[in-house]
Amino acid sequence: MSTERAKGAVPESYAALLRNEYQDSLDEELEMELDDARLDALSSDQPTDQPADSDREGELDRRFYFHELLRLQSELIKLQDWVTTNKLKLVVLFEGRDAAGKGSVIKRVTQRLNPRVCRVAALPAPNDRERTQWYFQRYVSHLPAGGEIVLFDRSWYNRAGVERVMGFCNDDEYEEFFRSVPEFERMLVRSGIVLIKYWFSITDEEQNRRFLARVHDPLKQWKLSPMDLESRRRWERYTKAKEIMLERTHVAEAPWWVIEADDKKRARLNCIHHLLTQIPYAEVARTPIELPPRVYHPDYSRHPVPESMFVPSVY
């Protein structure tokens, strides 16, 4: 082994490969950011064939945003290693109004992580059978085992929010939820689960702006359900329900953390940064990886693939 290789130096060809991979990662994030800019343009009456202004007053510098996001995501990988090594069980709840940006934060959290370790639970409305079960039953089956992270894109707090506002539960069910949920969460924490709860807070004006963007964007219209449109009309009832929920379920064992989410980029960075502070983790030493040499057999020959099987090279 050469002295250069012994010192861990990367050959120039590999360095170029790593640079390309890093650029791909930046491009992936940039695609998401361009999508956000397109929505901003739609909601502010800018022509959709022109980019939205990325230097508006108060906005984060794009270079700083990308740098911090990638730095925080590298820390998330260290957290992931710590969780798997120490068999921790981590549950993070993402709650908030429609279009508050929960999904975009979840995307950035999971973007670089192993889907076998970190998964998202986004449950649909309960079916007829689930409506007859213990209310928390369908959520319990999604809780993590040791070495897993589960992000709930909405959670059992549906009962305190949409179900209450839309009349999908009665007063007795609503009150029973508030009697049960503090004990349920204390039980989860006693069992060894780390439970973190986030509420994404946006203003009336910002939700209206984001809804208008989706109304006029064919790529995003699928996000607008009849329930979302009705929630716009019932803004004040949702506000009252949220205030009651936070007051009655903010317990020492599982407190709520409120994310100011009118600014999407700041909300993403602030949430990930805060999440990292909630688990005392350290970098896990990795065993050095040595790529094994390719085995060659003199009698091996690669069979030709018919041209008809190839996807046309349009690009």
Image: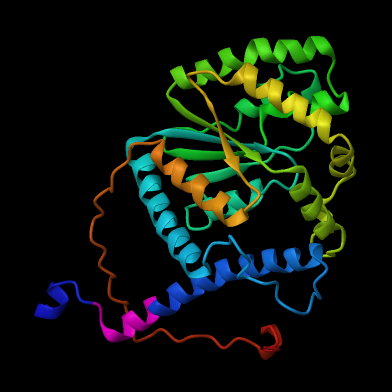
Q: Residue 53's spot in the image, x, y percent?
A: 67, 72
Q: Is residue 127 visible?
A: no
* Extreme residue in the front direction: 57
Using the rendered view, name the quadrant where residue 74 is placed: bottom left
Residue found 34% across the figure and 86% down from its top: 298
Q: Residue at x 13, y 73 (%)?
A: 6
Image position, residue 195 (x, y; %): 50, 29
Camera-side residue of 208 and 36: 208
Specify whether 13 is left or right of 73: left
Residue under the image location 81 percent in, 76 percent down? 47
Count of marks, rendered view: 0
Image: 182 above or below 310: above
Is residue 34 something that shows in the picture? yes
Residue visible at 83% across and 55% down in the picture: 222
* Magenta highlight on residue 196: no
Residue 235 placement, left or right of 180: right
Estimate the x, y position of residue 4 in percent, counting from the top left. 14, 79
Lateral position of residue 304 relative to residue 220, left or right = left
> Which sits in the foreground, 287 or 27?
27
Quarter in which the C terminus is drawn: bottom right
What range is drawn magenta here?
10-18
Which quadrant would residue 204 be assigned to in this image? top right
Judged by its main secondary structure, the magenta piece is helix
